[in-house]
Image (tube, rainbow, N blue to C red):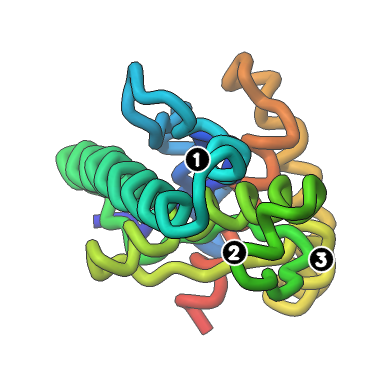
Amino acid sequence: MKPAAIGVRMHSGWGALVAVSHSASSTIEVVERRRVTVIPNGTAGVKQPYHFAKTLALPDAEKFIGSCFAASKDLAQMAIREVVNELSGRQYRVVASAVLLAAGRALPPLEKILASHAAIHTAEGEFFRDVFSKACHELSLPVTGFRERDLDQYLHAVFGKTATKLTQQVSTLGKSLGPPWTTDQKNAALAALLVLGNKKQ
């Protein structure tokens, strides 16, 4: 079976997932791409859990965020398992996964998060990235986080002189694949290539 890796760029309630396969002697192969929804339908507040929790007393806010996380993680697990099984049926073995990260500053306690609009937005970004990471971990799928602003640096560290060529190949894949092929899919694919490259070292 050919090795493959999953990359994801998360948003509030969903993620852009791309799976790629690549070896030193082959071109980059996008073997799967899809929008993964990780919030249950019809439940108030789940898309922006910290915004919603701001209206609650602190104990209720903690409980609400915890229940949202559990529900989102279950949905993420189902989606990842589905991708892994589908690719296995097509003779691809998913060996690793990657999630794109923000700056990665440590968050303050919940009470302070809910008192700051900026912190609420930061926390929600971390929330959904953490949902994906925990889902992969519980499926025993190795997961690595890469700060998005440092992608070029990571790529050059792993692929050396071929990094620029790989980035250009990924950038132009949309011509053959068709839409969507935005920054979401491009960077998710690059993150997946990074974990594949690390596996070969």
Per the image, the residue denoted by label 1 is 18
Q: Earlier in the sequence, mark 2 or mark 3?
A: 2
Q: Secondary structure beneath disc 1? A: strand
Task: Kindly identify the residue that appears in the image at 77 percent across and 50 percent down.
Answer: 167
Per the image, the residue denoted by label 3 is 150
Per the image, the residue denoted by label 2 is 110
Query: x%, y% of residue 94?
Result: 32, 57
Query: x%, y% of residue 123?
Result: 64, 55
73 in relation to 136, above or below: above
Amino acid of disc 1: Val
132 in relation to 156, above or below: above
Pointer 2 and pointer 1: residues touching (CB < 8 Å)? no
Amino acid of disc 3: Asp
Task: Kindly identify the residue that appears in the image at 33 percent across and 44 percent down.
Answer: 76
Name the foreground residue: 188 vs 174. Answer: 188
Does residue 185 show up?
Answer: yes
Q: Secondary structure beneath disc 2? A: helix
Question: CA gap, disc 2 to disc 3?
Answer: 28 Å
Q: Quadrant of the N terminus?
A: bottom left
Q: Say few, some or many: other residues with alpha carbon within 10 Å of mark 3 (under 14 / 14 to 19 / 20 or more).
A: few
Quadrant of res 68: top left
Pointer 1 and pointer 3: residues touching (CB < 8 Å)? no
Pointer 2 and pointer 3: residues touching (CB < 8 Å)? no
Question: CA gap, disc 1 to disc 3?
Answer: 19 Å
Question: CA gap, disc 2 to disc 1?
Answer: 32 Å
Task: Kindly identify the residue that appears in the image at 58 percent across and 38 percent down.
Answer: 55
Q: Earlier in the sequence, mark 1 or mark 3?
A: 1
Does residue 166 show up?
Answer: no
Name the foreground residue: 165 vs 41. Answer: 41
Query: x%, y% of residue 163?
Result: 77, 63
